[in-house]
Image (cartoon, grey):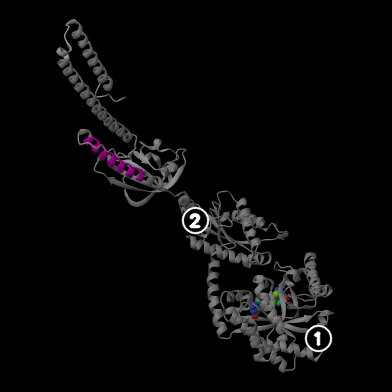
């Protein structure tokens, strides 16, 4: 609306018109007076002059008034324009009217108001900018819980603009769900967790704090809700939780989680009055697979096993990885009483069959087998730890049976485990009391029947039990460093006996000593061997070290280094139990070996079983191809001997030539050989 002027119409026009009217009136008056009254000029000159002066004065006054009015109007318009700019938010350029009247006062007041508004606006803009620059989502909420402001971060998080948030109940913007309920009343610095509900219905997990502000004006009271997106952190937490429970390789529960699941199965079993079985599965000779084909093959084995067993069992069955190549399976409802052991045995057999199917790995066919120990809750144990222990004892027995088999737990097994521990401590005492013995098993040349050496075999005669077999106590000794002491004792004893035979002008040939992996791993092993031989004055060439295939492959690089040292010192090296490991002959080529020992399991049926016969023949041929001597162990019958001779085997050893014997008996054997024809000549006829 146009401002209305203090004076209506155009003042200057009015003044001019008035002045013209006065002039016309004066001229008219002069004409009238001059003509009608015939007055002389002198008669009216004075009044006319007076009139003219008055008119002039009046015109001047009007003119001055007009100027004053114009100034007034101009200042008022300035004031109006200034007020208008302020309304539009322009606070620049103060309005200074150089006047002391009310308009001047009004202008000063207007300037004061402008300054205040300017300061307030700067503060407000600053606040808005601060809010906008914050990465935290901020919601200003009134005392009734309604949103009054939302910063851009909040809008972004909620995927909606501020206008649509203002007036909404703040609690409605959150969702209780899995992340926790939003609480406006719980103010303070402690962060809580909940989730914001985005416009598209998506849940955004947030950590939030609520602070209260108390302004003097009720409109200035309320809350600030500050929320931070924690979706990434939640994901990381989920991943950590997953990793903490699930085995990364096989994607089945790990030991911790599996034990927890067993605990739950126990609780369920109590409620339902049912039993369940724990199957403890362990891959047979897993180490060999790792050593020969590499760790990725080992990984594939474990994945294959998990996948196959998982596929075979009902979907609800729980499977977990205890460690390495050990797995657990909880079979529920399968065993309500011992009668159902048949069903369990059937499951175990099916699992073993499934695991034993060969699988391809980088062009190799890998034959993996496993052993299973089974314990039943609550019959065999009444808590998780004992149940695992019982299943483990059963597994131990399955392993001892040669692998690829299962065993159900029976209480005697635990007794055996205890006995094992006792045996271990007795073994140490026996060793300390020098109660171990060394027997020699002759090695015989197949073509001449001559004794060409012997294998030293350690014996332990336990008074209350009789002779304990090395297959029983060597593994016990290997669990501790006792095997190092025993190994050194054997070497020492062999050198001692050897020296004694030599002193009697006998030629014992080469004496073989069995080595454990732990011995080979001793940092100064070759120096120790050298030291013992020197002490007794025995040439290193008089000894042969027997190392099993799996020992050799355990840590091939390191073993190779030690074996090279020993070989260069003059010692002979033999691969024991050949054929039972996974190694190929070509893998063995890099080792400085002199002799291959065909495992007695092949020798046993070689004379009667075509497959075994073929294996033994192949080993002999390949061994010779690599310029190695081949010796067969476990020869018990003339038929076996004949087969081996025909197959071209170089040497034999076994019960056919008598039980492993004491040093003195071996001396007698050597003596009779030296006096006449080779002792075993007759066996070759
Ligand atoms: P190995 O080195 O393969 O030893 C051959 C085993 O076969 C010996 O069992 C021997 O008595 C047995 N044997 C010999 N001839 C026949 C036969 O005709 N038929 C059958 N069925 N068996 C026969 P032993 O003495 O019980 O030794 C078992 C294993 O214990 C040995 O297997 C060897 O690995 C280990 N061992 C023996 N003495 C020592 C030792 O001093 N140190 C280490 N580290 N291990 C040893
Ligand atoms: Mg041996
Ligand atoms: Mg052997």
Q: With 451 as the anchor, is 219 left or right in this view?
A: left
Is 59 one of the magenta-colored residues?
no
Residue 152 place in picture, x, y as percent:
42, 43
Residue 613 place in picture, x, y as percent:
79, 68
CB of mark 2 within 8 Å of CB of mark 1? no
Q: Which residues are magenta?
A: 104-126
Q: Secondary structure at mark 2?
A: helix
**In the foreground, 570 or 61:** 61
Quadrant position of the N terminus in the picture: top left
User: In this rendering, is residue 123 above or below 68?
Assistant: below
Q: Quadrant of ligand 3?
A: bottom right
Res. 348 visible in picture: no
Image disc number at residue 240: 2
The residue at the point 80 percent across, 78 percent down is 650
Q: With 74 as the anchor, is 249 left or right in this view?
A: right
Count of marks placed on residues? 2
Residue holding disc 1: 678
Choose the circle earlier in sequence order: 2 or 1.
Answer: 2
**In the foreground, 295 or 223:** 223
Crowdedness of circle 1 by 10 Å Cα count: few (<14), some, many (20+)?
some
Q: With 572 as the anchor, is 91 left or right in this view?
A: left
**In the foreground, 640 or 98:** 98
Q: Is mark 2 within 8 Å of ligand 1?
A: no
Quadrant position of the C terminus in the picture: bottom right
Among the 4 quarters of the image, the one containing residue 55: top left
Res. 77 visible in picture: yes
The residue at the point 66 percent across, 64 percent down is 294
């Amino acid at each position: 609306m146009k401002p209305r002027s203090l004076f209506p119409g155009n003042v200057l026009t009015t003044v001019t018109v008035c002045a013209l009217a006065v002039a016309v009136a004066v001229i008219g008056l002069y004409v009238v007076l001059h003509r009608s009254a015939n007055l002389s000029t002198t008669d009216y000159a004075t009044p006319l002059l007076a009139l003219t002066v008055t008119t002039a004065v009046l015109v001047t006054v009007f003119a001055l008034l007009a100027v004053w009015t114009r100034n007034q109007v101009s200042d008022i318009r300035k004031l109006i324009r200034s007020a208008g700019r302020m309304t539009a938010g322009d606070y620049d350029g103060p309005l200074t009217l150089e006047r002391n009247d009310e308009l001047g006062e009004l202008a000063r007041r207007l300037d004061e108001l402008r300054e205040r508004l300017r300061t307030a606006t700067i503060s407000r803009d600053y606040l808005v900018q601060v809010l906008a620059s914050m990465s935290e989502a901020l919601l200003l909420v009134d005392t009734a819980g309604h949103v009054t402001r939302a910063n851009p971060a909040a809008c972004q998080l909620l995927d909606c603009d501020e206008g649509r948030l203002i007036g909404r109940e703040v609690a409605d913007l959150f969702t209780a769900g899995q992340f926790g309920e939003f609480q406006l009343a719980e103010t303070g610095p402690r962060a809580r967790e909940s989730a914001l509900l985005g416009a598209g219905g998506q849940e955004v997990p947030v950590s939030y704090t609520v602070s209260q502000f108390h302004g003097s004006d009720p409109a200035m009271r309320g809350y600030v809700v500050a929320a931070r997106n924690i979706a990434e952190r939640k994901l990381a937490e989920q991943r950590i939780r997953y990793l903490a429970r699930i085995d990364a390789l096989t994607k089945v529960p790990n030991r911790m989680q599996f034990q927890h699941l067993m605990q739950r199965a126990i609780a369920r079993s109590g409620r339902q009055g049912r039993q369940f079985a724990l199957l403890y599965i362990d891959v047979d000779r897993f180490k060999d697979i790792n050593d020969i084909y590499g760790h990725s093959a080992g990984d594939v084995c474990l994945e294959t096993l998990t996948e196959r067993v998982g596929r075979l069992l009902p979907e609800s069955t729980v499977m977990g990885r205890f460690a390495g190549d050990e797995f657990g399976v909880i079979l529920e409802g399968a065993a309500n009483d011992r009668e159902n052991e048949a069903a369990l045995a059937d499951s175990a057999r099916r699992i073993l069959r499934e695991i034993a199917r060969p699988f391809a790995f980088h062009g190799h066919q890998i034959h993996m087998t496993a052993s299973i120990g089974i314990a039943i809750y609550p019959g065999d144990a009444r808590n998780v730890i004992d149940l695992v222990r019982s299943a483990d004892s059963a597994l131990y027995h399955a392993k001892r049976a040669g692998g690829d088999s299962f065993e159900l737990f029976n209480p005697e097994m635990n007794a055996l485990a205890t006995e094992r521990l006792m045996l271990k401590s007795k073994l140490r005492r026996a060793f300390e009391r020098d109660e171990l013995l060394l027997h020699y098993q002759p090695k015989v040349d197949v073509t001449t029947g001559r004794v060409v050496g012997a294998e030293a075999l350690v014996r332990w005669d336990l008074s209350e039990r009789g002779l304990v077999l090395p297959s029983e106590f060597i593994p016990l000794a290997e669990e501790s460093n006792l095997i190092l002491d025993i190994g050194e004792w054997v070497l020492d004893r062999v050198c001692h006996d050897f020296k004694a035979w030599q002193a009697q002008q006998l030629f014992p040939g080469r004496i073989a000593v069995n080595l454990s992996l732990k011995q080979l791993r001793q940092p100064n092993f070759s120096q120790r061997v050298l030291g013992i031989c020197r002490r007794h004055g025995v040439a290193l060439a008089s000894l042969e070290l027997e190392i099993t295939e799996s020992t050799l492959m355990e840590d091939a690089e390191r073993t190779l280094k030690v074996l090279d040292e020993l070989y260069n010192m003059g010692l002979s090296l033999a691969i024991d139990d050949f054929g039972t490991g996974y190694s190929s002959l070509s893998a063995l080529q890099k080792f400085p070996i002199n002799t291959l020992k065909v495992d007695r399991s092949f020798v046993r049926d070689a004379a009667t079983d075509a497959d075994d016969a073929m294996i033994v023949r192949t080993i002999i041929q390949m061994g010779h191809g690599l310029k190695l001597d081949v010796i067969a162990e476990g020869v018990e019958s003339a038929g076996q001997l004949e087969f081996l001779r025909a197959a071209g085997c170089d040497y034999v050893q076994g019960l056919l030539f008598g039980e492993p014997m004491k040093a003195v008996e071996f001396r007698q054997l050597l003596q009779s050989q030296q006096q006449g024809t080779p002792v075993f000549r007759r066996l070759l006829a």
